[in-house]
Amino acid sequence: MTSFAGGWQTLLYKEVLRFWKVSFQTVAAPILTAMLYLLIFGHVLEDHVKVYDRIPYTAFLVPGLVMMSVLQNAFANSSSSLIQSKIMGNLVFVLLTPLSHWSWFIAYVGSSVARGLAVGLGVLVVTSLFAWPQFVAPAWILVFALLGAGMLGALGLIAGLWAEKFDQMAAFQNFVIMPMTFLSGVFYSIHSLPPFWQGVSHLNPFFYMIDGFRYGFFGVSDVSPWLSLGIVGTAMLVVGSVAVHLLRIGYKIRG
Amino acid sequence: MPAISFQSVSKTFGSSRGTLTALDHVSFDIEEGEFFGLLGPNGAGKTTLISILAGLTRASSGRVAVRGHDVQSDYAQARRQLGVVPQELVFDPFFTVREALRIQSGYFGVRNNEAWISELLDSLGLADKANANMRQLSGGMKRRVLVAQALVHKPPVIVLDEPTAGVDVELRQTLWQFIARLNREGHSVLLTTHYLEEAEALCGRIAMLKAGRVVALERTSDLLKAASSNVLRFKIDRELPSQFADRARVTGRIVQLPAHDAHEIENYLAAIRQAGLRVEDVEIRKPDLEDVFLDVMSARHQQEVAA
């Protein structure tokens, strides 16, 4: 580490180094959690739930758990980094630099994507010991993993700028991120829901991320992957624009 | 072109209880190569002014430029010219000292900066802590790292916001030797401090802020020359009679009173003897910056200026 091409690369590098230095907590722990979900739900429900023909429930569960881990950890990365830096006061080191709002955005979202993918890959490797998934359309897997991680990284950026205390951040995580991921079809196909809740699920962008991601594994999904791509792409654009705007005006970080 | 230019800078904070004016049309320039002191009591607006300069806060009105670069519209260029040592003792617990410096250097796009980083570590007495985690450092060591971080991109304009608050004598000596060297090499320095003897020794020119307004802006030597009186200094064994309270500077047993002539000195000493106090170690000295500061900040001075 003797040279940097420019400022944003350094911030990206620093943000990646930040989570990597505590990877036991930021990468290994969520992998263990996902494995526990697979063991417990897979074991209990294997013979009772049939989502798609020819696909065992445990195998169905794997992509959902991978994507859930990607999303939650991408969010956790940017949000916890920002709130910690704000509360400890060391965000000033970045605030004093000539880095533009675009540099901030790329670095915080980029590092969130890196952590999301690191955890997702770990979950995939570990869970594949129990149920070997198929890889029918790997390009879709990659596209939805990147878009989902990017959007949650940007959402974490917004939450990190907005929150002034750790409990506000915990509220955002527990009342927004957790319900949206759990109600997105990680553990079930929304076709198994009553019509009303199917309708509600269609309003949740997380549903499209997981459905599109799962399509990449099985070639089967609740809605067309192209529709999912359109909706997730639009959501990413909206959330990203809000995050860039907040960074540009220095929302809650420049008085 | 001035190193720093404040042009009619105002800052108001709104709250539910009304608005607070932190800065009220502050204007002055700091020239290239100057060692400039910004003094004032707590709450006078010093840190707010520095925050606006550094881009941490926006001015409500007015303009601030660093070597001609507006801190808002041309912030990237302005911040490249600036090295700011923040007042709060902050650090990033994830990194070692050397990592923190490399990262800070990288933010400014400065590559291959190892030679300068090593020189900073040596000059600030941090060489043996280079690979220690920030968490393991004492308060004084963390303060040194803050200074090194501010200087890592070799900024032509250095801003120190109370850099010696709560630090030991050794660090103060190390720090001032180094900053004075950088100043001799052409760096401009803006310093805020509560240690007025430091400001007197280091700063060529001084601005004093009171309640968000500039109440003095002069060469340090002129400020001291303009002080109207000498100072009578002595020790007493009991509490000072109340008739002197508004004029005296009291530090424990030491009392310092402004004295214009021999007659006044005699009167003071007579009055104190009459009150039954024992006086020791009497001396008469030239006024220092602290006397000038107290004079400027006092209500009397305000009245004189108004008259």
Image (spheres, coloured by chain):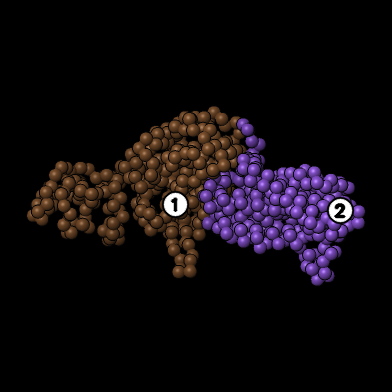
Tell me: residue B102, above or below residue B236. above
Residue denoted by label 1: B47
- Between B148 and A30, the residue placed more toward the observer is A30
- Which chain gets the brown colouring? B
Subunit of label 1: B
Residue denoted by label 2: A56
- Between B23 and B237, the residue placed more toward the observer is B237
Q: Of the residues shown, which amino acid type is indicated by label 1? A: Thr
Q: Is the same chain shared between marks 2 and 1?
A: no
In whole angstroms, how far apart are the C-alphas of marks 2 and 1? Answer: 64 Å
Numbered disc 2: secondary structure: loop
Q: Residues within 10 Å of mark 2 (few under 14, many from 20)?
A: some
Tell me: residue A99, above or below residue B10. above
Left or right of B48 in this view: A52: right
Please identify the residue farthest to the right as the structure is shown.
A54
Look at 37% across and 35% down and name the residue there: B170
